[in-house]
Amino acid sequence: MSAACALELPLTMPPLAETPQHSAARRAVLSSDGGSLTIASSSASFPTGAAVQIWKQDCRAGLAARIPDASVDFVLTDPPYGIDGMGEEWDHAALAGKASRASVIGSLPVGMKFDRQQGKQLYDFLLPVFSECLRVLKPGGFMVAFSQGRLYNRLATAAEDAGFEIRDMLGWTYEGQAKAFSQDHFVRKMKIPDDEKARILAELGGRKTPQLKPMIEPMVLAQKPREGTFVENWMAHGVGLVDTSQQLDGKFPGNIMAVPKPSKAERGEENGHFTVKPLRLMDHLIRLFTKEGAVVVDPFIGSGTTALSALRTDRRCVGFEISDAYFEVIRRRLDRA
Ligand SMILES: C[S@@+](CC[C@H](N)C(=O)[O-])C[C@H]1O[C@@H](n2cnc3c(N)ncnc32)[C@H](O)[C@@H]1O
């Protein structure tokens, strides 16, 4: 796919402290040929002089075709979750329908449709992607991949089987919305005498489907095996250690990160994506695991949050997104940034 520019838009960067990267970013242009978005900066050299480059492409082909071995500092990604509607197919229309019916009894909330094949399918989907992530990372480079509680085990195992060392489970915690469903309605609809219904309802005691209010999204913290000691690896590749001066809450950084979900203003009016991550969280993760100028890759970039965070933190980003609609959202978010 050519990176030739069909569209050039002036890009105004957020007002940050003056650094060489910022002045370069102010000279940036956002260009697009329908298949890729590029924020080119005269000082950035990877890849093809881009500060941000996002490809409308399946990452399984894109990573292999576009990213050289051991060229990337950090993989930060939020892959499809592998649960209903949020699998490989990422069915936006079905998810939107489900969200609009969420309070209607009889339609199951997202994540409740149980299928034993989901975990295996997620593992099979992620294993080759994570193998590519391992290949493109520099030795000692980190990967942080989001998940959801039900299939986190499969995601972490895929990372481990791809060759990563699993360092930790991180958690993004937020104020979630209760999703559990009462069963009373189904009992009331049973074709049985009323006193029998009353007996069952009393026995159930208001119990609901097995979903506590979701308040945590787990992430795997995985590391490509180092070359030598931590110090030797850092001196050779500039990755593999954590910047513990970065604080979210005034304390030593912890593996549970409390950040509110992004507001409508932060997401953007046009952004109907279902799993947008907060910029403050993404900024924190990028700062913890990389230094300025680092290259961050996101194979499943969705509405482009990782790219926005990379710009805000003076890093560079290469991303992939398969959906035309989300690609357009990314274009608008980057343009507005
Ligand atoms: C969980 S969402 C990422 C959301 C993102 N964190 C954000 O803040 O907007 C996963 C994204 O991966 C995309 N996707 C699914 N399969 C893909 C593939 N093979 N290659 C590239 N993108 C893919 C989906 O369209 C979806 O937008």
Image (spheres, helix red, strand yellow):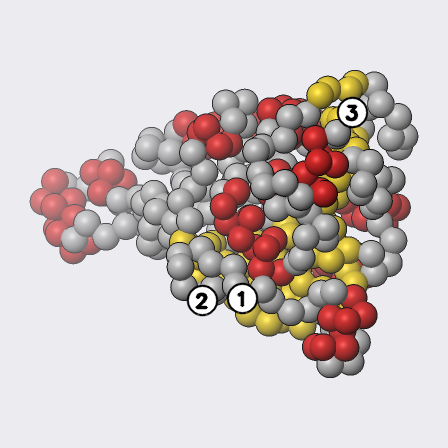
x%, y% of residue 118? Answer: 59, 53
Cα–Cα span, label 1 and label 2: 7 Å
| Nearest to the observer: residue 282 or residue 191 | 282
Q: Secondary structure at mark 1?
A: loop
According to the picture, the residue beneath numbered tag 3 turns out to be 32
Spatial CA distance of label 1 from label 3 is 37 Å
Q: Position of residue 54 (x, y in %)?
A: 74, 36
Q: Mark 2 highlights which residue?
A: 252
Please state if 153 lies on the left or on the right of 205 as rendered: right
Please say if the residues under marks 2 and 3 sit with CB atoms less than 8 Å apart.
Answer: no
At label 3, counting other C-alpha atoms closer than 10 Å, the crowd grade (few under 14, some 14-19, many 20 or more) is many
Which amino acid lies under the numbered mark 3 shown in the image of this protein?
Answer: Ser
Q: Position of residue 86 (x, y in %)?
A: 57, 42
Q: Foreground mark, 1 or 3?
A: 1
The residue at the point 88 percent across, 26 percent down is 4
Label 2 lies in ligand 1 vicinity (Cβ under 8 Å): no
Q: Is residue 290 left or right of residue 270?
A: right
Residue at position x 63%, y 50% in the image? 77
Q: Which residue is disc 1 drawn over? A: 244
Residue at point 51% right, 36% down? Answer: 274
* Quarter of the picture holding the N terminus: top right
Could you say which is closer to the camera, residue 328 or residue 188?
328
Element marked by disc 2: loop
Q: Are marks 1 and 2 in contact (CB under 8 Å)?
A: yes
Give the distance between the C-alpha atoms of the residues marked 2 and 3, in whole angstroms: 41 Å
Q: Earlier in the sequence, mark 1 or mark 3?
A: 3
Q: Nearer the viewer, mark 2 or mark 3?
A: 2
Neighbour class for label 1 at 10 Å: few (<14), some, many (≥20)?
few
Q: Is residue 209 left or right of residue 27?
A: left
Q: Earlier in the sequence, mark 2 or mark 3?
A: 3
